[in-house]
Amino acid sequence: MKYMLLIYSDREAYAALAAETQAQINRDYFTYTQRIIDSGEFIAGDPLQGVETATTVRNDNGRRTLTDGPYAETKEVLGGYYLVDVKDLDRALELAGLLPGVQHEIDVIEVRPLMDLPEIPGS
């Protein structure tokens, strides 16, 4: 089953860490990623640039409107993701709990299954 592990980061908590701790967390993320690549569970994953680079797109009575910044103002912001293919929800939750940001108590992870869509005829 495919799951999205959405990584919500507390940027202030991360910034408050010592530089060597930040560097260790980054190394731990590389190690984590390599482990799930080696296990065959990794499909995709990337960190996202900061919320200051975001643009939100809306439709207002048929007119596209753009707003600088994220959709919602929150303390924790979407900082990255992993897309994994695992045997069940328990394994997805286990992988989420092993993420370095969770171990260092600066990230929270939302685990969501991907929706299976029916085949589109003629495609």
Image (cartoon, rainbow, N blue to C red):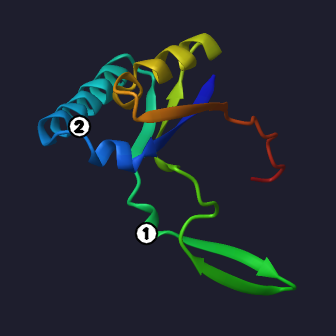
- Which residue appears at 87% of the width and 85% of the height? 61
Seen in the image, is 40 located left or right of residue 85?
left
Q: Nearer the viewer, residue 39 or 97?
A: 97
Residue to which mark 2 is pinned: 26
Q: Nearer the viewer, residue 91 or 11?
A: 11
Residue at disc 2, secondary structure: helix
From this viewpoint, which residue is outermost toward the left? 20
Q: Nearer the viewer, residue 47 or 18?
A: 18
From this viewpoint, which residue is outermost toward the right? 61
Which is nearer the N-term, disc 1 or disc 2? 2
Vertical comparison of 74 with 84: above or below: below
Marks 1 and 2 close (CB-CB < 8 Å): no
Rendered image: mark on residue 52: 1
User: Where residue 51 sits in the image (x, y, percent)?
Assistant: 46, 63
Q: Residues within 10 Å of mark 2 (few under 14, many from 20)?
A: some
Dividing the picture into quarters, in which one does residue 37 lie?
A: top left
Please, what is the three-letter code of the amino acid marked with disc 1?
A: Glu
Seen in the image, is 109 located left or right of residue 102?
right
User: Where residue 25 sits in the image (x, y, percent)?
Assistant: 24, 33
Seen in the image, is 49 located left or right of residue 75?
left
Foreground: disc 1 or disc 2? 1
Q: Nearer the viewer, residue 67 or 43?
A: 67
